[in-house]
Image (cartoon, rainbow, N blue to C red):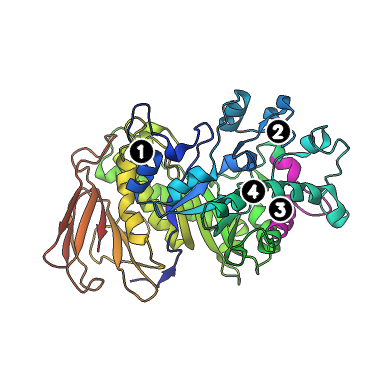
Amino acid sequence: MDPEITLLDDGFGYNTRFPETAEPWGSPVGAGSATTWTSALDASFANCIRYPGGTVANFWGAQQDKLFSKKASHNPSGWIDVNKVGFDIITNAVNADAQQVNSLADLKKAYNTGVSVLFVMNLVTPGKDFYASAEGWNRTINDHPGTSGQNDDWYKMLDARYEKSKQMLIKAQQQGITVKYIEIGNEVYLANATYYAEVFSAYGGRSAGENYAIAANYIANKLKNDPDLTNRNNFIFSVPGAAEKVDFTSSRILDWNSQMVPSLNTDLFDYITLHSYQEADLTIDNFTAANVKSNISTWLDNMNQTFTDKSTYSYILNTDKKWRVWWNELGITQKSAAVEKKWGAILAQVFAALWSLEKKGALYMQPNLNNTNVVDPNTGAIKGKGYAFIPLMQASRDNIKARKLKFPGSPTLGPGGRTVLQGYLFSNASGGNKKACIINLSDQPIAVDLSDAFPGMAQLAISGEKSADPNNAGDPDHVSYHTNPSNNVTLDAYSVNLVR
């Protein structure tokens, strides 16, 4: 077995995003469904969820618990110009006045299932256009960061956004939701929205990334010292680093880590958030065993290429500071919803989650709970990907240690010598509560001896099997829970397994 990895004991979960669903956690999943989103979340065994979401967070009005209104509304609490947003999901909702309240009282229903909540702070909006308007400060804005210290409007706007954004943390406290994990912004390095670029650009002889680090340090320090936040001494912060596709086209993305990460206050930050969508060719019609292995190998090659890009990732992976990673979005395909439902793609996604542990992962969030391949949008029933992630959710819950399992003699996955069997053994601080998540990417069942990992009888949960036609969309063919008479466990073809 490989060396032990330390992780967060509630760090495997789902992104959530409900900007157009009113009070989602108490609402039925679909019209006429008896299942609420809270029930679906509970059935998924998720350990953590993200609020109010990723992209939506940078346009979120925490005072009203919904997306900001559009500019024409003249809302004194804050508005956004949809022409400066750059994301269709936000633009469409705000343009149509379709944004809905997602209150902290409603979020408490989800919290009561036992999940932790990762809160995302809004550092981007309202923008300087709002603060220059009659609804804001009604004057010219000097937004060049750091030109005159905290008297500069750039800092004043950060202060104003902070006061708005922290309201979700205050309201969470009032509901009895423990505030622990906080992301200081979301994907601000992309700058594909005018609002992003306006707030974090190169000013004062510093790059956009350096100015972002100044803002992140500033906001984290405010959070740590805010008397309104009762759990502030236990806050755990992360800040967005860059981990997009291998084909970097933007110098802003390419240089983000080298500019931003070294400027962070290491007394405040231990974690970097990474998002990545690396596309293996998962659109093929005939998803045979060879193709499953080939496509995962291609994806792995792409990711390894990304993480050996010295100029981009050495600042996270190879520095004296022992940075850890929150993989808050990690996708193996963005081709289409239909492709993501295919069992081969689902297996690849579980593989990606296990792989994230090798790259300093301490927290992993699968996008998104409200995807149709996780939860049926009509009935609320757990679907293929939701089933496939249950073993990992259960194996990691309440455990802070993970160790990669070795399977000598099993077939190889492709270049690099990886095998078709991939798994991790999870345990708590004292080495108890042992559970393993193991996937079999082969078209054949494989027997393994787990006596080195488990001293007693092993219980096996098979989350999915698609040996007959692994390319079909929908539910797994087979789900079973049984007790084995010994430590010799048979892992079905194309399966995801919980062993304990």
Q: Residue furthest front?
A: 174
Q: Mark 1 vs mark 4: which is more N-terminal? A: 4
Q: Let me know if residue 283 appears in the view.
A: no
Q: Residue furthest left?
A: 485
Which mark lies nearer to you, 4 or 2? 4
In which quadrant will I find the N terminus? Answer: bottom left
- Give the residue at x 71% y 38%: 195
Q: Mark 2 is on which residue type?
A: Trp
**Front in this rendered view, residue 470 or 266:** 266
The majority secondary structure of the magenta stretch comes to helix
- Expressed as whole percent of the image width and height from the top left, the position of residue 378 reads 34, 29
Q: Mark 2 vs mark 1: which is more N-terminal? A: 2
**Mark 1 Cα within 10 Å, few/some/many (few <14, many 20+)?**
many
Q: Mark 1 is on which residue type?
A: Val
In which quadrant will I find the C terminus? Answer: bottom left
Q: Mark 4 vs mark 3: which is more N-terminal? A: 4
Whole-angstrom CA distance, mark 4 to mark 2, is: 17 Å
Q: Which mark is residue 79?
A: 2
- Expressed as whole percent of the image width and height from the top left, the position of residue 340 reads 37, 37
Disc 1 marks which residue? Answer: 375
Q: Mark 4 is on which residue type?
A: Gln
Whole-angstrom CA distance, mark 3 to mark 1, is: 36 Å
Which picture quadrant has residue 219? Answer: bottom right
Q: Mark 4 vs mark 2: which is more N-terminal? A: 2
Which mark lies nearer to you, 2 or 1? 2
Disc 3 marks which residue? Answer: 212
- Expressed as whole percent of the image width and height from the top left, the position of residue 416 reads 37, 59
- Give the residue at x 57% y 26%: 98
Which picture quadrant has residue 477? Answer: top left
For the record, the magenta segment spans: 196-219
Disc 4 marks which residue? Answer: 167
Q: Mark 2 vs mark 3: which is more N-terminal? A: 2
